[in-house]
């Protein structure tokens, strides 16, 4: 026969369960670092970055001295 004073869940178990559930939910929350930019990148910014990259390749700043001379 079960003890009539026993509770199905005591306060420690409820607190632990709540904290565990909270930790699981927060682990799935999107990180602000990984979220999309609030402002889309403009075509001129893309063009500028590409030109900088091409200039780096031409000046061989990519770490491989043969990059600018390779046939692609």
Image (cartoon, helix red, strand yellow):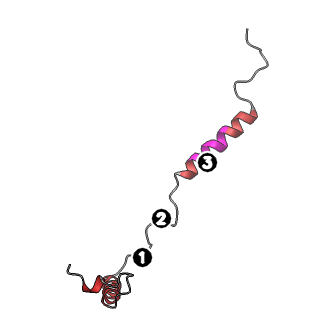
Instruction: Say which quadrant the N terminus sits in.
Output: top right
Asked which secondary structure carries label 1, the reply is loop
Say which of marks 2 and 1 sits in front.
Answer: 2
Residue 62 falls within the magenta-colored stretch? no
Instruction: Say which quadrant the C terminus sits in.
Output: bottom left
In primary-sequence order, the first of circles 2 and 1 is 2
Residues shaded magenta: 17-24
Of 22 and 47, the residue lying toward us: 47
Residue 39 vertical position relative to residue 8 in the rendered view, above or below: below
Are the residues tagged 2 and 1 within 8 Å (C-beta)? no
Q: Quadrant of residue 21?
A: top right
Q: Main secondary structure of the magenta part?
A: helix
Query: In the rendering, which numbered label is found on residue 23?
Result: 3
Which class describes the residues within 10 Å of circle 1: few (<14), some (14-19), or many (20+)? few
Q: Quadrant of residue 17?
A: top right
Query: In the rendering, which numbered label is found on residue 27?
Result: none
* Residue furthest front as drawn: 66
Residue 20 falls within the magenta-colored stretch? yes
Query: In the rendering, which numbered label is found on residue 39?
Result: 1
């Amino acid at each position: 026969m079960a003890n009539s004073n026993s509770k199905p869940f005591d306060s420690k178990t409820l607190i632990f369960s709540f904290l565990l559930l909270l930790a699981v939910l927060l682990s799935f929350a999107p990180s602000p670092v990984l979220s999309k930019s609030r402002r889309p990148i403009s075509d001129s910014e893309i063009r500028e970055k590409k030109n900088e990259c091409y200039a780096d390749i031409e000046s061989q700043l990519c770490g491989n001295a043969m990059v600018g001379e390779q046939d692609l």
